[in-house]
Image (cartoon, rainbow, N blue to C red):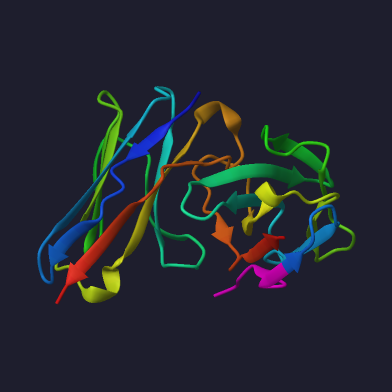
Amino acid sequence: EPEVTQTPSHQVTQMGQEVILRCVPISNHLYFYWYRQILGQKVEFLVSFYNNEISEKSEIFDDQFSVERPDGSNFTLKIRSTKLEDSAMYFCASSELQATNEKLFFGSGTQLSVL
Amino acid sequence: QKEVEQNSGPLSVPEGAIASLNCTYSDRVSQSFFWYRQYSGKSPELIMSIYSNGDKEDGRFTAQLNKASQYVSLLIRDSQPSDSATYLCAVSPSNQGAQKLVFGQGTRLTINP
């Protein structure tokens, strides 16, 4: 079965540093998402992306966050100046269509630790 | 604020029994409902989706939806130790289009051999 791949699996960074989390969505998918899960807490929506632009974002996704599709395969999440509270598992997801009943495929996640 | 509530558990069920997981949601106009399984440190994996009132069965899993009561449940029959995981209820708000899922906090299920 096709899968969403994420790199790195673990990222450790110092507070204030920039990090880029990378994702390769499933090749024929058009809609891309980032979710995050702070340890012991709910999975939270961050942003959705379609046709090279953000289609929706949550309150969490402030000016410190940005997303980009730099080429035909990668989808990245950048955190410009990391804070301690950014420590979480970040999941990339993709879907073929935009529909409320469309299946989301999640990647295996990047565990970000901000020290 | 749209909320999805689950009993965090832990819920312990003997092997072979039926595990029953429950979820309530606050947004009355929600249209799509999902159950994900999440093993510790892993990503959510879709188990069931349901969109209409009533029951939907897939193998050992049955999802039940009652929109009037804003309630969705998951039954796991003939529970196996491999079913031990956290089960996440997720709701897709109807007016959002794309999969902006709202997740519950998850119910931790343990199947005892």
Instruction: Please identify the quadrant where the C terminus of chain B is shown.
Output: bottom left
Q: Position of residue B45 (x, y in %)?
A: 45, 62
Magenta residues span: A1-11
Q: Residue furthest right?
A: A70
Spot occupied by residue B29 in the image (x, y as percentages of width and height): 43, 23
Q: Residue at x 43, y 24 (%)?
A: B27
In this orientation, which residue lies closer to the viewer: B34 or A76?
A: A76
At x 78% / y 51%, what residue is drawn? A82
Which residue occupies the foreground of this view, B100 or B113? Answer: B113
| Residue drawn at point x = 60 percent, y = 34 percent | B97
Q: Position of residue B80 (x, y in %)?
A: 20, 73
**In the rendered image, which quarter is residue B19 located in?**
bottom left
Q: Image point 67% across, 62% down: which residue?
A: A113
Figure label count: 0
As for residue A4 lying within the magenta part, the answer is: yes
Location of residue B68 with respect to A19 vertically, above or below: above
Q: Is residue B15 above or below residue B35?
A: below
**Splitting the image into 4 quarters, where does residue B11 fall?**
bottom left
Q: Is residue B11 left or right of residue B14?
A: right
